[in-house]
Amino acid sequence: MNELDDKAFNALFKEAFEKCFAHPLSGPLTETESKQFYNKIFDQTGLVVGWKSLKNYSFFLMNGSGSKTENPSVATMDTLARYVLDAPYLSEIERKEKESHYPYWFEYKEKFHRSLKTAAIPELITPAPSKKKPFFRRLPVFTCMVAAAVFVFWFLKRPSHYQTITEEFHDVSMAALVSNGWLAQNPDTLFWNKRNEKANCLTLYTLRGDTWPNAKEKLIVRNLVLREIPGPCFSVEVHLSDFLPDQNWQQAGILLMEDTNFTGKILRLSIAYNDFFGGYNKPKEMIIQAITSLGKTDGEPEEIAHQPILFLDSARQNKALFQNVTNMSLRIEKTGNQFRFLYAGGAMTNPAFREIETHHFDIHPKWVGLFAIKGFVDHASEIPVRINFFRLTENSCE
């Protein structure tokens, strides 16, 4: 942040604190105060600023001369501004879709800057212009300006640097997930509170819901954990463990979506159970399944991949076969409209990937989600799936 923005954030934080506690900030926050502050902000705005971040900001503001600096995100400053300005309650998803320009922070900052000008703070007064120097004395400045222009031109023309997002789910608290760019949609309180029941992984359960269009049911996925996709071409990878579906339509995997309410196109890659063969007698199977959907009201989905990875009756007779699904990984690679679907499974934590299918599909996904469902049925059990690794890599489309 520049100096003016830093002063605006300083004033904003102190104003938010005073609104919460009814007295001015006089020292760094304690852990209890930070958690109370966090809850008040969340209750009023529907948005999260982690309590540890609030505590760190208070230390920074009260000890500004220290060596440690804080650089709050625009989203954090907008949340504090929403709290101070009594903005309407909304979720992170709604803000991403409707107010991603963070209007309340910029409104607060503008008012703050205007108040500084009105008060005529000395350091903001523009100094009187000096007498113009001869050209030869201004030549070094001119040279620096030319050099700067050349650098900016080179910077803009240089090859793009693509980002990679990696998550190992060591901390799955709501504050940590939001801080790392994740959103939780349609939380089921009972099962969402079990997300940390095993260390160093995110635990989801196969709850009732589906993305398969159904005239009688509202499309919904409980405890859908999602984040924005940074560019049009990318690869996304997720590692699963302790997942053994044995009832229709239990499954877990990756969703690619054009929007978060399932009205746009959807692509789904999952590990699933299947014993539905339209009357034919075939062995029960765990499969890799890929499905595309044109949207909520545009006809039936298309199954583009159906690859068995384990026949359950055979595995029950030969227990050693279960080690082939101890650790499982899914990967989707998108280049333009071409998708590659890959799977890896085995006793090791890093088994080799193999291609399941390549398919062309005209979709422009903006979100990637991690999910577990059992379809629109009540008889199937809610079983856990442990997600212990995620990677999203932005790639060149060339």
Image (tube, grey):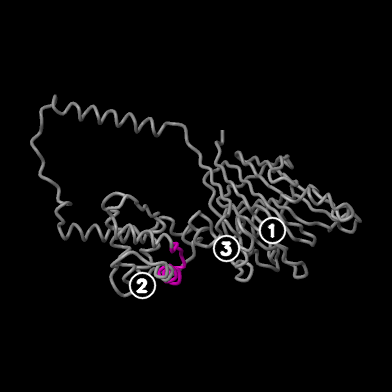
Placement of the C terminus among the 4 image quadrants: top right
Dividing the picture into quarters, in which one does residue 206 lie? bottom right
Q: Which residues are magenta?
A: 37-51
Q: Which residue is mark 2?
A: 20
Q: Nearer the viewer, mark 3 or mark 2?
A: 2
Q: Within 10 Å of the Cα at label 2, are there few (<14), some (14-19), or many (20+) other Cα atoms?
A: some
Q: Which residue is mark 1?
A: 385
Q: First in sequence, mark 1 or 2: give its number.
A: 2
At x 76%, y 50%, the residue is 325
Horizontally, is 266 left or right of 61 in the view?
right
Q: Report how far apart the C-alphas of labels 1 and 2 lie in the structure.
A: 39 Å
Q: Residue at x 65, y 61 (%)?
A: 204
Count of numbered tags: 3
**Quadrant in which residue 190 is drawn:** bottom right
Please name the residue shown 60% across and 42% down the image. 235
Type of amino acid under label 1: Val
Q: Is residue 49 magenta?
A: yes
Q: Are marks 1 and 2 in contact (CB under 8 Å)?
A: no
- Indicate the position of residue 174 as horizontal and vertical percent values: 52, 62
| Residue 313 falls in image quadrant | bottom right
